[in-house]
Image (cartoon, helix red, strand yellow):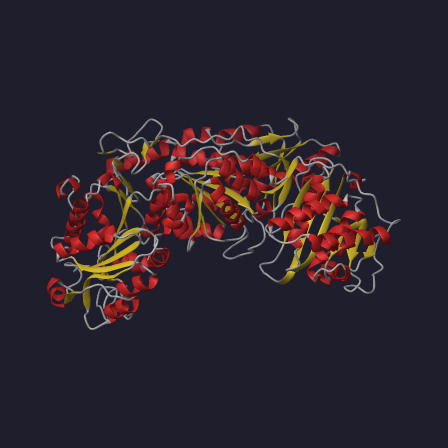
């Protein structure tokens, strides 16, 4: 199989030059490199420009609600942990509407890879600042500049308990592909923040802006170091920032020990003894 | 006259005094003596303090609801005496601790029986808390029941909790002996026959619902704690490993329903449970279930709102809400079980309906039905069947992109299970074509909308219709839905005993609205009285809207308390 096989007959609707093209490319390459069967891959999409990858990827897809792809992915993996589960969402979806779910899936170390398309904007709704936007961002809804300070995606994921945290750049597809391969291979909650421009609504954080600031780093040795790295002088460290071995949520369930939970099938159960306990 | 056939026992005390456990043991004890019971508890939203009560109506003949008036009042604190003394019927008995009431009021024809609950508990080597067991023993003695049956139940109850029953049994015996010594002459032989029978369960609506789900092949249950649905979560949690289910508490109701949809999408037979406030949070994703045609059963165990409302009380205020919830329009099914038996069978059936029709299905219960208990024979498991609808689990020889939402004569499309089937498709919250690709084309939109709604006539055929109980040419018909069934049945029985002709028309599924069946039944009526636990008369409104007819009268109740047959009868008599 090659990357072409992962295309559907629908071409993306993203603006020319959008970082989503780069992420889409790296994603397909990683799937090919890892040799995954496309009918065993479930991608759960959020709502936004990133979520509009839905029509373009030939795998099993679930295009869910804004802010809610993570819990859907959690449920999919519980039912059948043999499936490769990936979440594709924007930064508004993940840190605005859906931040609570990121926190709890991280705590659970639910096995999935969440890829955040981080362009600091709600682009599909025409350019409002997202929770990752720089303080003072001027848009049509924030004419005096946004007031809140931005959430730090890497620090958030680290403190949530994600066992794999990486950051990448949509303008460096080979690096991003390798990062995805490692995230997909990791068992547990893998979080990858992908820095990208929004060519239509974000004139500040452009490709040149990121190229000047991203710095490839090695994984931190302790959680504390990883957080320091994320808060440190290097504005945009990229690569695997943190990886630890910890049992994934479903690995702690006896119901999942003997294989995918749904492989047992569903049958009528004999509850005579159970009813007798109420006599 | 009434006490030969039935009597009502009520115990009261502070939260933390074990009122609920004590009451439950009393119910079980009566059931094992061959009597029919209904029990009901009232408690405020607290862990300690406040005022808790537990009442049990005990009857020789089958009974469906409580009655007004208490024949035995057991007071574990003075507040119980103050609050409930006026409920005690003439020639009723009040058991109380003289510490709580040193001077007995000269009041009506009521027998005050002092018993030092606390002292007896301490004397028998137990803690003060065991005064609840002393009260049980005293009750058993007053009713001429067998102590060994109480002992058996105390043993079972405390062993299940991993504790020693010995102290409780000794305390209970102390209460039992005290009554036998002190009140040999004046206690009143009650109609309980001391024959040991163990052929009826004592079971709550939530427990019956959980059993129905287990029997009906439930695989995954997701929930967030919320009164009065929490006991479904605890019941299923305890049983998950034995029966091979995954039961998970999520961080909020939104993740509950989205995780459930993910699990169902990936092939698990799934249910979620909550109350009105949690359902409010689930509403958006109910639309997601509908749009992606992902099967899901949602239990809404009602309590009064609006908002936080009365968390530990009962009501029927969510009917219109669940019928219309989520933006735009789509088919759904709603079950409104009226008793523990319907809780059992309808839950299993709901799982089938959800998977056959690939829609969201709601089971609407309430605190009164969910947490109250009824004695009932073991449910016959034969009618339970597991149907998964048109799913594809067999591995396709070649992987292919599949028309998951292809148009069919019934509107139901084949549903490949991801992974197992090797078939690919997109489940899409956006409007979509037959493969699930996002589409804004108007012809695609029309086709998909019509496909979704095409299911409705077939769905209607498979939902339980309204049921007529009682005389054919009834001069009055009581009409209701859900848990008012019991009070309506007993009210009708009381009126029929007085020589009237009264029937009950119980709506078991208000959606899809059973237009022709209900119309047919209502044509048989002479006078109709609708009974429902909400302010605006929601079923009444649906009947007026869809059938263009109004009942002769409507009896609504919205104070958080259940209906009593006596008050229904009073209202019914005013019509005749």
Q: Is residue A190 left or right of residue B128?
A: left
- Vertical placement of residue B491 versus A196, above or below: above
- Vertical placement of residue A154 versus B302, above or below: below
Q: Position of residue B177 (x, y in %)?
A: 81, 52
Q: Nearer the viewer, residue B238 or B78?
A: B238
Q: Nearer the viewer, residue B422 or B348?
A: B422
Q: Is residue A190 left or right of residue B307?
A: left
- Vertical placement of residue A94 versus A225, above or below: above
Residue at the image position 58 percent from the left and 54 percent from the top: B312
Q: Is residue A97 visible?
A: yes
Q: How many marks?
A: 0
Residue extending farthest bottom: A233
Q: Position of residue A239 (x, y in %)?
A: 19, 61
- Vertical placement of residue B59 versus A225, above or below: above
Q: Nearer the viewer, residue B259 or B342?
A: B259
Q: Nearer the viewer, residue B3 or B473?
A: B3
Q: Is residue A49 visible?
A: no
Figure quadrant of the N terminus of chain A: top left
Q: Position of residue B206 (x, y in %)?
A: 55, 44
Q: Is residue B109 left or right of residue A242?
A: right
Residue B503 position by quadrant? top right
Figure quadrant of the C terminus of chain A: top right
Residue extending farthest right: B185
Q: Position of residue A138 (x, y in %)?
A: 21, 68
């Amino acid at each position: 199989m090659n990357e072409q096989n992962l295309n559907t007959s629908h071409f993306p609707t993203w603006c020319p030059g959008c970082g989503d093209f780069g992420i889409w490319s790296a994603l397909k390459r990683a799937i090919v490199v890892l040799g995954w069967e496309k009918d065993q891959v479930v991608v759960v999409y959020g709502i936004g420009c990133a979520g509009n990858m839905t029509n373009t990827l030939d795998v099993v897809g679930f295009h869910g609600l804004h802010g809610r792809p993570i819990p859907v992915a959690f449920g999919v993996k519980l039912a059948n942990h043999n499936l490769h589960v990936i979440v594709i969402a924007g930064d508004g979806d993940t840190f605005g509407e859906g931040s609570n779910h990121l926190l709890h899936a991280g705590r659970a170390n639910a096995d999935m890879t969440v890829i955040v398309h981080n362009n600091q904007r709600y682009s599909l709704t025409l350019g409002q600042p997202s929770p990752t936007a720089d303080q003072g961002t001027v848009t049509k809804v924030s004419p005096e500049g946004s007031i809140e300070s931005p959430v730090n995606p890497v620090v958030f994921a680290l403190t949530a308990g994600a066992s794999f945290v990486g950051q990448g750049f949509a303008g460096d597809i080979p690096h991003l592909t390798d990062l995805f391969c490692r995230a997909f291979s990791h068992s547990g909650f893998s979080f990858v923040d992908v820095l990208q421009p929004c060519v239509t609504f974000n004139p500040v954080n452009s490709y040149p802006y990121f190229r000047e600031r991203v710095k490839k780093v090695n994984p931190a040795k302790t959680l504390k170091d990883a957080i320091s790295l994320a808060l440190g002088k290097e504005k945009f460290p990229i690569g695997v920032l943190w990886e630890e071995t910890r049992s994934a949520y479903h690995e702690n369930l006896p119901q999942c020990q003997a294989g995918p939970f749904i492989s047992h099938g569903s049958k009528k159960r004999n509850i005579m003894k159970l009813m007798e306990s109420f006599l | 006259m009434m006490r030969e056939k039935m009597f009502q026992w009520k115990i009261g005390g502070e939260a933390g005094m074990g009122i609920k456990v004590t009451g439950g043991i009393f119910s079980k004890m009566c059931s094992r003596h061959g009597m029919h019971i209904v029990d009901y508890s009232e408690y405020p939203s607290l862990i300690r303090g406040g005022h808790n009560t537990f009442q049990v109506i005990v009857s020789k003949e089958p009974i469906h609801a409580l009655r007004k008036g208490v024949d035995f009042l057991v007071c574990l604190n003075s507040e119980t005496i103050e609050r409930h003394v006026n409920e005690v019927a003439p020639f009723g008995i009040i058991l109380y601790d003289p510490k709580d009431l040193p001077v007995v009021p000269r009041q009506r024809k009521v027998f005050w029986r002092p018993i030092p609950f606390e002292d007896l508990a301490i004397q028998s080597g137990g803690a003060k808390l065991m005064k609840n067991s002393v009260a049980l023993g005293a009750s058993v003695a007053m009713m001429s029941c067998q102590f060994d049956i109480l002992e058996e139940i105390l043993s079972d109850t405390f062993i299940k909790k991993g504790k020693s029953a010995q102290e409780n049994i000794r305390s209970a015996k102390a209460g039992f002996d005290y009554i036998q010594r002190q009140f040999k002459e004046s206690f009143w032989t009650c109609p309980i026959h001391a024959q040991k029978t163990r052929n009826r369960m004592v079971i709550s609506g939530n427990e019956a619902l959980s059993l129905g789900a287990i029997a009906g092949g439930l695989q995954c249950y997701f929930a967030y704690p919320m009164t009065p649905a929490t006991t479904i979560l605890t019941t299923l949690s305890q049983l998950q490993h034995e029966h091979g289910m995954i039961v998970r508490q999520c961080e909020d109701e939104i993740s509950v329903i989205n995780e459930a949809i993910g699990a169902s999408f990936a092939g698990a037979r799934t249910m979620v449970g909550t109350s009105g406030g949690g359902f409010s949070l689930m509403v958006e994703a109910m639309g997601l279930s509908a749009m992606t045609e992902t099967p899901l059963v949602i239990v809404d165990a009602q309590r009064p709102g609006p908002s936080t409302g009365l968390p530990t009380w009962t009501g029927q205020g969510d009917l219109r809400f669940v019928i219309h919830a989520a933006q735009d329009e789509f088919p759904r099914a709603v079950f409104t079980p009226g008793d523990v038996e319907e809780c059992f069978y309808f839950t299993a059936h709901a799982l089938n309906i959800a998977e056959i029709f690939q829609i969201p299905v709601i089971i609407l219960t309430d605190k009164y039905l969910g947490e109250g208990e009824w004695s009932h024979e073991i449910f016959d498991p034969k009618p339970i069947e597991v149907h998964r609808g048109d799913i594809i689990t067999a591995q396709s020889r070649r992987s292919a992109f599949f028309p998951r939402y292809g148009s069919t004569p019934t509107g139901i499309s084949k549903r490949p299970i991801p992974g197992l089937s090797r078939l690919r498709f997109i489940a899409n919250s956006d409007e979509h074509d037959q493969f699930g690709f996002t589409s804004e084309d108007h012809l695609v939109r029309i086709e998909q909308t019509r496909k979704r709604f095409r299911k409705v006539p077939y769905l209607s055929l498979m939902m339980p219709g309204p049921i007529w109980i009682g005389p054919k040419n009834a001069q009055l018909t009581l009409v209701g839905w859900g848990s008012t069934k019991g009070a309506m049945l007993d009210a009708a029985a009381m009126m029929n005993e007085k020589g009237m002709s009264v029937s009950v028309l119980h709506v078991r599924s208000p959606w899809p609205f059973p237009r022709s069946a209900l119309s047919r039944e209502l044509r048989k009526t002479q006078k109709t009285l609708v009974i429902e636990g909400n302010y605006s008369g929601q079923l009444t409104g649906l009947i007026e809207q869809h059938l263009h007819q109004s009942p002769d009268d409507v009896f609504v109740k919205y104070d958080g308390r259940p209906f009593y047959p006596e008050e229904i009868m009073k209202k019914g008599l005013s019509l005749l």
